[in-house]
């Protein structure tokens, strides 16, 4: 427990992500020795600058880990039928084990329909209804990367979930909901908060583990946090000065929390690491070689 004036332990997501990536690379090498090179295909539609950066980073990380990487770049004018055609081709391609369609899609394209068209066994973002249902019934297959990264950060920081009061702010399909399901599967007592939650600070103060996944700069203040609590900050926001800031007021919360993730360098790096882990899992599962890796 952190006493007043002391600083929380910083959970170093960059270092933990590097460890996960190194482990994945070692397992990819083992799988390759069995004749299977995991293939990841990232589909990028349009010119959104942030998406371009994310896709470049995913490509680079996957290549470094020894994956076969194929990025499919399509113009913003791509029709829904053309995009679904690309997804079907990738579904049928034996060399592709993981498919990620970078979201958001340009206006006019239906992301839900595209996700539903994915082969669930290749859905390394864990968004296909079959994977969502598997997680909801407590038998997860492919799990969304950012929430999986949050659990990995806790595990590798030796912060147990069982019996803890776990509060997540945010109920998106991508982060809040799947994270709540993962925490519940790990025997935490889970509360999901959102924009209609009454007295949010009081609910947050009841948390042993508090996760902010909102998208509002420095919304979580020190007096929202119980002394000694663990705080994970999923938010990525651009401050007025252009710098990245999270959903948590880091400096003041670090004086009260027991452990905290910084932004950048906390949850962010874990997302790509877990994408690699998911792709490895998909490849090993299809080859029937899960025991090998
Ligand atoms: P969404 O916009 O989909 O969801 C935001 C959630 O926050 C909603 O459930 C919303 O409630 C809730 N919310 C909004 N305002 C408030 C408020 N004032 N009080 C309480 N709850 C509120 O965002 P995402 O889940 O996709 O992302 C959340 C953040 O995480 C963003 O900053 C995003 O950039 C970042 N992110 C980071 C990733 C990483 O790799 N680190 C990956 C993915 C996202 P309601 O449902 O009622 O509208």
Image: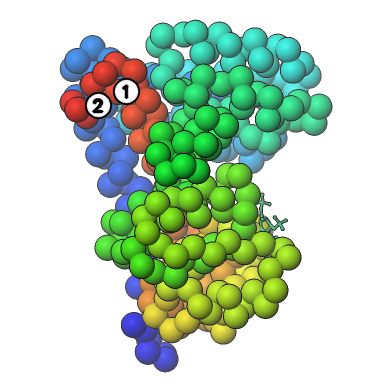
Number of other residues with Cα within 10 Å of mark 1, as a class: few under 14, some 14 to 19, many 20 or more: some
Q: Residue at x 42, y 44 (%)?
A: 138
Disc 1, SS: helix
Q: CA distance from mark 2 to mark 1?
A: 5 Å
Indicate which quadrant contains ligand 1.
Answer: bottom right
**Disc 2, disc 1: CB below 8 Å?**
yes
Judging by the rendered image, the residue that carries numbered circle 2 is 290
Q: 213 or 64, which is in the foreground?
A: 213
For the N terminus, the quadrant is bottom left
Q: Position of residue 99 (x, y in %)?
A: 50, 23
Residue 277 in sight in this render: yes
Q: Is mark 1 within 8 Å of ligand 1?
A: no
Q: 138 or 239, which is in the foreground?
A: 138
87 versus 4 height, above or below: above
Disc 2, SS: loop
Q: 123 or 215, which is in the foreground?
A: 123
Judging by the rendered image, the residue that carries numbered circle 1 is 285
Number of other residues with Cα within 10 Å of mark 2, as a class: few under 14, some 14 to 19, many 20 or more: some
288 versus 123 height, above or below: above
């Amino acid at each position: 427990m952190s006493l007043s004036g002391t600083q929380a332990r910083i959970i170093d997501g960059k270092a933990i992500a590097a460890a996960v990536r190194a482990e994945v690379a070692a397992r990819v090498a083992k799988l390759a020795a069995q004749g299977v090179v995991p293939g990841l295909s990232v589909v990028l539609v349009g010119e959104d600058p942030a998406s371009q950066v994310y896709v470049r980073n995913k490509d680079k990380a996957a290549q470094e880990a020894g994956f076969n990487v194929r990025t499919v770049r399509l113009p913003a004018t791509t029709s829904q039928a053309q995009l679904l055609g690309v997804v079907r081709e990738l579904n049928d391609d034996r060399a592709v084990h993981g498919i990620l369609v970078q979201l958001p899609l340009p206006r006019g394209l239906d992301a839900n329909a595209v996700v539903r068209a994915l082969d669930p066994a290749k859905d390394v973002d864990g968004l296909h209804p079959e994977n969502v249902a598997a997680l909801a019934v407590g038998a997860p297959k492919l799990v969304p990367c950012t929430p999986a990264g949050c659990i990995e950060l806790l595990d590798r920081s030796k912060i147990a979930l069982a019996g803890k009061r776990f509060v997540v702010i945010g109920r998106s399909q991508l982060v809040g909901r799947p994270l709540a399901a993962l925490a519940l599967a790990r025997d935490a007592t889970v509360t999901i908060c959102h924009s209609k939650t009454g007295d949010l600070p009081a609910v947050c103060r009841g948390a042993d583990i508090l996760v902010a996944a909102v998208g509002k700069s420095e919304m979580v203040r020190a007096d929202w946090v119980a002394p000694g609590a663990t705080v994970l900050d999923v938010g990525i926001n651009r401050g007025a000065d252009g710098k990245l800031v999270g959903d948590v007021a880091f400096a003041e919360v670090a004086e009260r929390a027991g452990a905290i993730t910084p932004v950048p360098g906390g949850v962010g790096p874990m997302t790509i690491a877990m994408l690699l882990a998911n792709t490895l899992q998909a490849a090993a599962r299809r080859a029937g070689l899960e025991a090998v890796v």
